[in-house]
Image: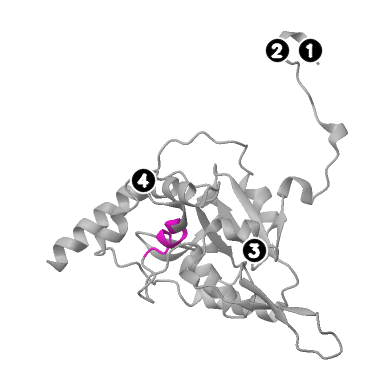
């Protein structure tokens, strides 16, 4: 029975990962321009073009369906030349890839603000150490939820549906791995925030914020985009931008 489930899971995982046509809303950033702007610890969000990507975008009401961590030269000597990202793939598990993996895809760079170099090194090391972890593809019912591009799930349950395979520590999917890496150094992404009185007799009405960690399995790629603790870096603006140098063509009808 285990062999049957394993084969079925592999087939299902590959079917969900197969690219489908998606009409892009913007021009992708050329790989060389993208890599020139990246720093170790940056999170790269990706608008994927697979069946599972379509489901994730629908469930999160977001452009972003995938996330990868830029690790710079941390993989030198232990991965193929040019590999500088770590990502989690349904079929292949946690793996390293180069910037060419995202060629032709819409991306966004999310940079942790104010992170120390030491903590950045720890985040990168956390992800590197987990290369090779895989998702148990015999859990076919977990995978089957993504057969529909728009799963019929009530909105209040959609975030929990993203927690693909989160019950097994050897399973790592997309933003779950990256969330764990940042949580390992107590860097916030989207913590649960509550307010309570400080108890200071000199300031009876003063409040303080208490942050609580959200379980890593509940994070989605979108969370890095909307997090107040991550800066958005746009490669087209990073090297300087002068709108006066743009070349405009004629509009339909001859209008300028």
Gap between marks 3 and 4 measured at Cα:
26 Å
The residue positioned 57% from the left and 80% from the top of the image is 184
Question: Mark 1 or mark 4, which is nearer the start of the sequence?
Answer: 4
Mark 4 vs mark 2: in front: 2
Judge whether residue 160 is colored magenta: yes
Gap between marks 2 and 3 measured at Cα:
41 Å
Gap between marks 3 and 1 measured at Cα:
42 Å
Percent coordinates x, y for residue 50 in the rendering = 41, 45
Judge whether residue 45 is colored magenta: no
The residue nearer to you, when weighing 87 against 177, is 177
Q: Which of the numbered marks, if any, corresponds to residue 42?
A: 3
Which residue in the structure is indicated by mark 4?
18
Locate residue 1: give its quadrant.
bottom left
Which residue in the structure is indicated by mark 1?
255
Badge 1: residue crowd in 10 Å (few <14, some 14–19, many ≥20):
few
Which residue in the structure is indicated by mark 2?
252
Numbered disc 3: secondary structure: loop
Does residue 109 lie above or below 187 as drawn? above
Gap between marks 2 and 1 measured at Cα:
7 Å
Q: Is residue 19 left or right of residue 189?
A: left
């Amino acid at each position: 029975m285990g062999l049957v489930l394993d084969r079925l899971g592999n087939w299902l995982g590959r079917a969900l990962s197969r690219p489908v046509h998606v009409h892009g809303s913007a021009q992708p950033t050329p790989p060389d321009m993208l890599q020139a702007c990246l720093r170790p610890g940056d999170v790269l969000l990706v608008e994927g073009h697979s069946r599972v990507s379509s489901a994730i975008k629908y469930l999160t009401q977001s452009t972003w369906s995938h996330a990868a961590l830029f690790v710079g030269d941390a993989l030198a000597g232990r991965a193929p030349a040019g590999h500088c990202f770590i990502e989690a793939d349904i079929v292949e598990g946690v793996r390293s890839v180069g910037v060419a993996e995202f060629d032709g895809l819409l991306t966004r760079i999310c940079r942790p603000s104010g992170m120390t170099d030491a903590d950045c090194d720890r985040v990168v090391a956390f992800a590197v150490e987990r290369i090779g972890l895989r998702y148990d593809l015999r859990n076919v019912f977990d995978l089957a939820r993504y057969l529909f591009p728009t799963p019929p799930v009530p909105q209040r349950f959609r975030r929990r549906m993203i927690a693909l395979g989160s019950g097994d520590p050897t399973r790592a999917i997309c933003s779950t791995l990256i969330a764990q890496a940042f949580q390992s150094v107590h860097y916030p992404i989207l913590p649960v925030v509550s307010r309570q009185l400080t108890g200071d007799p000199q300031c009876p009405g003063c409040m303080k914020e208490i942050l609580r960690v959200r379980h890593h399995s509940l994070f989605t790629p979108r969370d890095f985009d909307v997090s107040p603790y991550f800066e958005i870096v746009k490669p087209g603006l990073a090297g300087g931008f002068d709108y006066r140098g743009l070349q405009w063509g004629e509009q339909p009808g001859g209008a300028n």
